[in-house]
Image (cartoon, rainbow, N blue to C red):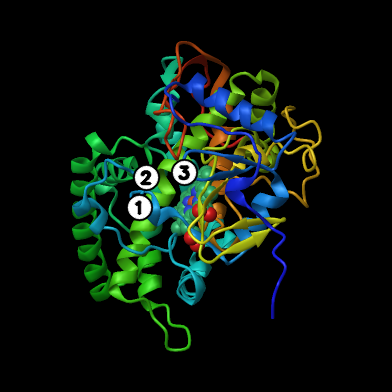
Amino acid sequence: MYRLFVATPVDQLSIPVVSARGMHSHGDRETQLATMRTFSQESWITRGEIGYNILHYDHAVAILRDKRWHSAIGLITEFNPDATPEFRARRRESILSAEGDTHVRLRRLIGPAFSPRNADALRPFMREVVEELLDTVTNSGTADVAIDICNPYPIPIICELLGAPRSDLALFSRWAGDILRVFDNNLKNDIPLITAAQDELDEYTRALIAKRRSEPRDDLLSALIANEEQGDKLSTEELVMMVEAVILGGTDTTRNQLGLAVALLANQPDEWAAIARDSSRAARLVEEVMRVNGAVRATGRVASIDIEYNGVLFPQGTLVFPSLATANFDPAKFRDPELFTLDRNDANSPQLTFGAGIHYCLGASLARAEMQEALPLLARRMENLEISGPVRYKVATAGIYGPESLPVKFTPNPSRGHCAT
Ligand code: HEM
């Protein structure tokens, strides 16, 4: 009955400490990431202010796949001293925070709607949206890619997917931007904006669901309403939660990831020219961009019970942060990880920016399709792209990160049309 306890309690490990305090600028953020990557040569784990960073690919994946570790998304506000009790009380379960049978059921009911096939069906629409956005800038030869292209791009796609009218684009954009401030570590200022946006989105979503119940159409929301598996259906509350998860999960992520991609490719002129000529490179390009410069650098897990892992005891309640951005540079998985190259044979080690395990990004096929369609068109119509001024990034602590302003100049190519494959 007695067990010899050999695992070392995590707080007794002698491991490097990485602090996010004093991280203000883009440079600070890059330095912190470089420090983590350096520490990863000597340790798979570092200590942070409120938990432990997991640095190696295999350990990050193992923890994300281990059901004893639960999503820590619901704890974001718990650990924020600026969150008021009223703000904390507003927290609701979402697919991101659900675990166990509840989560399995949600993924079973919702997952099929996010299949690669359904994402592919939206590709012509995605191209149309990108072309329209490019039409507004390609005469001048200058643009702010973040503001003119990346920010607006995902919203019509999400509206089309859900079956929301395009006239509501501006509303969606504002709600998504404001609600996602919860990740930006600036709650002191942001609570009023976040709660107002949550309330407005809630009211809007309920009205849209009611409309689709009485007038079903060929869209995701109608499909989710009709979806019936062995007599199981999503309740109205679950539908509201899902629509909101799609709006929130599907906008800021894609727009920031596309902005990071363009910022990176502006310094890779040969690749920019190559993708303009040959869109069949797009799939590999998107994976490598996301490996090298992912918009989501880490995610959080909390120990639901005492967990022994890799000789370490993590008491119940311990927080860990699998560092996707450090794992994406793990030399055990990616040869010459600093090198940006499309010639990777990473079938056994996909880039981790979409996460892993049961919470693996539901919208990954959609996001991939959006970027695979956008990048060749941008490269084709913005030839010889160069960054033409200071790039301004989001606050350094932002959970979903990317450029807020990305000024560029280029040789305009006004003619529409997809490049050869
Ligand atoms: C490049 C763009 C995107 C990135 C980098 C990204 C990243 C991620 C990551 C890392 C997770 C897992 C979080 C965790 O394990 O804690 C996740 C989950 C999720 N994503 Fe994405 N995402 C992107 C686009 C999208 C899109 C387009 C949608 C929806 C249309 C979406 C919807 C979701 C949802 C609903 C979840 C929760 C899944 C679950 O808990 O089962 N994401 N995403």
Quick one: 370 or 140, which is closer to the camera? 370
What is the crowding at mark 2: few (fewer than 14 residues within 10 Å), some, or many (at least 20)?
many
Q: Say above or below: 313 vs 29.
A: below
Viewer can see residue 219: no
Circle nearer the N terminus (3, 2)? 3
Q: Tag 3's secondary structure?
A: loop
Q: Pointer 2: what residue?
A: 155
Residue located 50% across and 69% down the image: 107
Residue nearest the observer in this picture, 57 or 249:
57
Q: Earlier in the sequence, mark 3 or mark 1?
A: 3
Relative image position of residue 386 (x, y in whole percent): 55, 14
- Amino acid type, label 3: Ile
State the image quarter where residue 144 is shown. top left
In the image shown, does 365 or 354 lie closer to the viewer?
Answer: 354
Tag 1 residue: 159
Q: Is mark 2 within 8 Å of ligand 1?
A: no
